[in-house]
Amino acid sequence: METNGTFHKEFYILAFSKYVRSQFVIFFLVLFMYLFCVFGNLLVVTLIYTASQLHTPMYIFLGNLSVQDIVYVSAILPQLLAIIVTGDTSIAFLRCIFQMFLFVSCVITEFLLLTSMAYDRYVAICNPLHYAIIMNKKTCTLLAEASWLIGIFSSLKYSVLVSNMSFCSSQEINHFFCDMKAMLKLSCSNTTNVHLTIFVDGVLFGIIPFILIITSYAYIISAIQKICSSAGRYKAFSSCSSHIIIVVMFCGTSLTLNLKQNSREFQEQDKLLSMLYILLVPALNPLVYSIRNNDILKAIRTARWKVK
């Protein structure tokens, strides 16, 4: 990575440097949400691993989603907290590439896991008699593993591409982490192919999964309307609405920010919107997908009884 005969060993992450008076509030908000996300998702993973009644396809997907969320936030938020506390915005080039790798792989993996979860619920509600045959252990494991592998290998491709670029502009990344699009703005290499690849992958691993998720929930809601019991309909609608809100928050903001054209006018707004799917959604996932679930609550009560 050369610039006029020099080798850049680090970048500088601007984070929220423009909000000087709000640094204290930002630090404690990020710290609280980070700890809440990590401990909430660790609880979900532990319960699913230890409670035999939770060894079903739906909870296997939930467990994978929780692991992914922990990796996701841990790749970005500790570095952001360190920047706010120390004021040291520098980050080594290889560490920046690694952070970008984890971020991209987790985003793609989450899209695919959410799609698998939506399909699982579609089969369970719309085709319950064949659920055990369609969503068997082998199928469930294959979907989960494919989500991780596609995310990892797709991200590895971007890591190699960005690593081989020349950076001859400012070394200041105007974001709170090593965002790939923010890094591409600093490159003096031809980034056309990279932007095209981002768009294609955005369609394959973002837009298409999002359409499949919404389609699945449309069929689910149609099936729920046929339930005779009003209490049963309300319970099912309540669960689905919560899931859809999370899906729209994550998919909507991530797709909008990663596929839209770059604009310097809205860089600060983009950073704040990024907090929705990087900070808020992973923290809410344990509540929406798990903690509100009766099976999870029973597993918690059972675990507390065993401890006593």
Image (cartoon, rainbow, N blue to C red):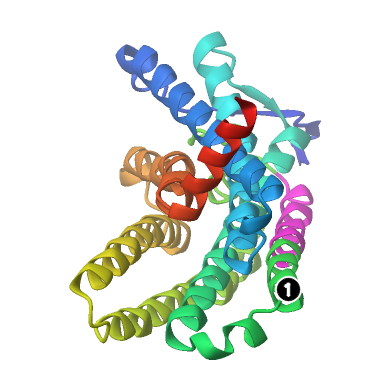
Residue where numbered disc 1 is placed: 137
Q: Residue 190 or 179: which is nearer the viewer? A: 179
Figure check: 296 above or below 96: below
At label 1, the amino acid type is Lys
One can see residue 178 in this view? no
Q: Is 85 inside the magenta-drawn segment?
A: no
Q: Is 162 inside the magenta-drawn segment?
A: yes
Figure check: 288 above or below 19: below
User: Who's the residue at 65% across and 68% down the image?
Assistant: 193
Figure check: 275 above or below 18: below
One can see residue 72 in this view? yes
User: Who's the residue at 38% across and 56% down the image?
Assistant: 246
How many numbered discs?
1
User: Who's the residue at 58% across and 90% down the image?
Assistant: 130
- Percent position (x, y) of residue 305? 57, 33
Asked which secondary structure carries label 1, the reply is helix
Which residue is at the far left?
230
The stretch of residues the image draws in magenta is: 150-166
Q: Residue 139 or 265: which is nearer the viewer? A: 139
Q: Residue 81 or 227: which is nearer the viewer? A: 227
Left or right of 24? Residue 35 is right
* Main secondary structure along the magenta-highlighted residues: helix
User: Who's the residue at 22% across and 68% down the image?
Assistant: 231
